[in-house]
Amino acid sequence: MRALPKLKPAEGDAAHAAAQKVVEVHRRLAGFVKAGMTLAKVDAFVERTLTDLRCRSAFFGYRIKGHPPFPSHACLSLNHCVVHGTAGYHTKPLAAGDVLKLDIGVFNRVGNQEWVGDAGWTYSIGEPAPEVRRLMDCGKRAIAEGVAAMRPGSPYIGWARAVQGRVEASGFKCIERWGGHGIGTALHGPPHISNTVPRFPGEWPEAMNLWEPGVLVAVEPMLAMTTGETYQKFVPNTKDKVQDWPVYTQDGSISVHYEHDVLITKDGPWVLTEGMDELPDVL
């Protein structure tokens, strides 16, 4: 297995600077987003904010086989859309009770190198229903407990045990087959970080790998009220079966998503996106 790249201290500082650009975008979004806005208006605000912060979207135009280029500057996922919602997939204005997942990815230049920051958080438009509030709180506890398990020398699977254990003990479901990933100077890379413990050999080959100082990952619990299953639609009006980006819960139940950038150090996990936890999540 190819060795993972390990960040040097100066590179950790550069990655932290990118991560903090993401936190600042979220901070400004928390003061901007409100009922009556469309996702397109929110995405336009993200574009302006990235320009003001002298960085660029890591998502806009992103390509992956079988999908069209990603058309938005942020991922904007509403209610039963778990992740990868686009600015145009839902055109009605935000309304009280909506649950909005905002995922921001940036390229931020430090010297002659661009570094990625990538973090998502869940917001309620107006006060959430009690069960939605409990789901949101569970997601935040799951990511905190998962990060605490990311100690150097401990296996990746400890993250999944902490996250899945918290989610299922609370009566909710982890979204299956989706998880975190390595970052750095590219948006996606190894390792894959599953939010669930593998059910059979080979399902998550990296599960017993050990956390090592210098490894940088974006970890992201995704959970829903009543299902871990998801589906995606095909892009309309295309001859080929091209998959659209938004990922939905199979039964239409509400979902939440939380994502931090974490650098493993000899002293433990360093959350590069610190400050996300302090943001208001009722807008």
Image (cartoon, rainbow, N blue to C red):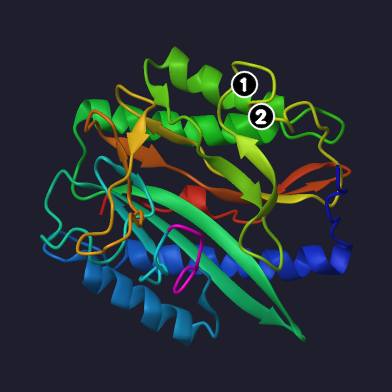
Q: Is residue 117 left or right of residue 43?
A: right
What crowding class fits label 2: few (fewer than 14 Cα within 10 Å), some (14-19), or many (20 or more)? some
Q: Label 1 amino acid?
A: Pro
In which quadrant is the N terminus drawn?
top right
Q: Which mark is residue 204?
A: 2
Q: Position of residue 77 (x, y in %)?
A: 31, 52
Q: Are marks 1 and 2 in contact (CB under 8 Å)?
A: yes
Q: What residue is shown at x 42% (from left), y 42% (from top)?
A: 257
Q: Secondary structure at mark 1?
A: loop
Mark sitting earlier along the chain (1/2): 1
Dominant secondary structure (helix, strand or loop) of the stretch shown in magenta: loop
Q: What residue is shown at x 20% (from left), y 64% (from top)?
A: 237
Q: Position of residue 275 (x, y in %)?
A: 54, 55
Using the image as rendered, state which of residue 132 and residue 160 is in the foreground. 160
Q: Which residues are magenta?
A: 59-66
The answer to whether residue 15 is above or below residue 169 is below
